[in-house]
Amino acid sequence: MKYPTEKLKELALEAGFTAAGELSMDALVFLPEVRQMCSADKCGAYGKNWRCPPACGSLEEITARVAQYSYGMLVQTTGKMEDEFDGETIAATGKAHAESFRRLMREVKKSYPDALGMGAGTCDRCKTCTYPDQPCRYPDDSYSSMEAYGLWVSRVCELSQLPYNYGPCTITFTSCFLLK
Ligand code: SF4
């Protein structure tokens, strides 16, 4: 069964996202510049997590992986901050987004076991990632970020005609998933 995008949007909103929209497949351009930002390791996860580079695959491998998919959805969670230094809301919105994403992907995978999800930020399902000594604890229930795949998220949103920024004192996390 192929879900129409309206049904997928409905599932996304039910899972807790504040917005969802069809992903433009033309926007899936995997940029070495974005991967270079990963390798600068400002987040401290480069080479320390199965879902981050280099473990999540080279740009060539990612391009080949994604070429198998024909359509997809962007999903977002926006939080309203008290001011621009409201780190508590940023953290809470990020956590809610990650939980909604896992919830949605579990639902989507009931009909599409090979759906490909790309989340937001480093996978933090485990207190300490098993990388590189042991296999990932949740290989079917954990996700690389859009950035880890080399995507420029604001550009992907723009090309998909979905806002990336919802205005002053808001914080938005964006993820996506692909279907065949
Ligand atoms: S699920 Fe755990 S082991 Fe797997 S990538 Fe995430 S943090 Fe690492």
Image: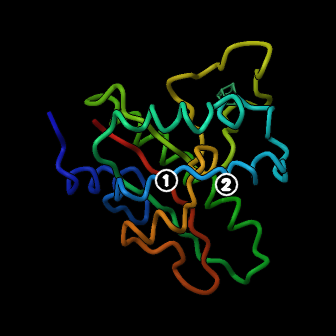
Toward the bottom, the furthest residue is 168
Residue 71 in picture, x, y percent from top left: 29, 47
Q: Position of residue 84 (x, y in %)?
A: 74, 81
Q: Is 47 located above or below residue 77 in the figure?
A: above
Q: Is disc 1 surrounded by few (<14), some (14 to 19) or many (20+) residues within 10 Å?
A: some
Quarter of the image where one finds residue 89: bottom right
Q: Residue at position x 44%, y 50% from top?
A: 176
Q: Quadrant of residue 54?
A: top right
Quarter of the image with the C terminus in it: top left
Tell me the element at label 1.
loop
For label 2, the SS is: helix
Reading the chain from its start, which is encountered first: label 1 or label 2? 1
Q: Nearer the viewer, residue 180 or 86?
A: 180
> From mark 1 to mark 2, how far is it between C-alphas?
11 Å
Q: Mark on residue 34?
A: 2
**The N terminus sits in image quarter:** top left
Please state which of residues 43 and 125 is positioned toward the viewer in this rendering.
Answer: 43
Hey, what amino acid is under mark 1? Answer: Val
Mark 2 is surrounded, within 10 Å at the Cα level, by few (under 14), some (14 to 19) or many (20 or more) other residues, namely some
Q: Which residue is found at the position 55% from the left and 61% from the top?
A: 153
Q: Is 122 situated left or right of 60 in this image?
A: right
Ligand 1 resides in the quarter of the picture at top right
Q: Considering depth in this image, is 71 or 60 the residue closer to the camera?
A: 60
- Which residue is tagged 1? 29
Give yes or no for contact between labels 1 and 2 (Cβ–Cβ under 8 Å).
no
Q: Which image quadrant for residue 17?
A: bottom left
Among all residues in the image, which is located at the extreme left?
Answer: 1
Q: Residue 13: give x, y in percent of width and height.
A: 35, 58
Residue at figure coordinates x 76%, y 22% from the top left:
131
